Amino acid sequence: MSYKSVIATLGITVLCIFSSLAMAQQEGKSRAMDHGQMSGGMMGGHMMMGQMMAQHEDMSQLMSKMMQSMAAIKAEKDPAKLKALLAEHAALMDQMHSKMMSQGNMMHDMDGKMKNCGGMGASGK
């Protein structure tokens, strides 16, 4: 083998080794980032769960107020007072509608995030 072919072979070998090491390092960084995103997602999931529990409590309290309001409407005989009670009940219904729409949007956003999550494809459902 000539001197030039030994140098060329050695050069190609070194190039292959460095490219393999670079690819391995890049893959390691990618895995670390994926793990970081998973940890952040889990942390976000716990925060989301707390937010959902708080919203559930708010909705329960609002529903209780609506039930009390409906009972008062059913019991009231005076038309003037009934009109005021109906206005209060309408305000409670508006609050309920607003909260439900907000929760629906949050669930829609969460669904989109889960679909975009690496491990939650079609098999995650």
Image (spheres, rainbow, N blue to C red):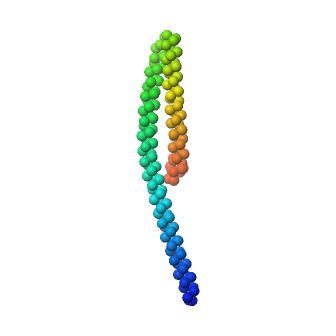
**Quadrant (top left/top right/bottom left/bottom right) for the N terminus:** bottom right
Vertical placement of residue 98 versus 29, above or below: above
Which image quadrant for residue 65?
top left
Vertical placement of residue 26 versus 106, above or below: below
- How many marks on residues? 0
Vertical placement of residue 1 versus 15, above or below: below
Indicate the position of residue 66 as horizontal and vertical percent values: 47, 24
Image point (46%, 14%), residue name: 75
Q: Nearer the viewer, residue 101 or 123?
A: 101
Indicate the position of residue 122 as horizontal and vertical percent values: 54, 50
Indicate the position of residue 18 as horizontal and vertical percent values: 51, 73
Q: Give the residue at the far bottom of this rendering.
A: 2
Indicate the position of residue 72 as horizontal and vertical percent values: 46, 17
Q: Nearer the viewer, residue 125 or 31?
A: 31
Image point (53%, 74%), residue name: 16
Image point (52%, 78%), residue name: 13
Vertical placement of residue 19 versus 92, above or below: below
Image point (44%, 45%), residue name: 45
Q: Give the residue at the far top of this rendering.
A: 78
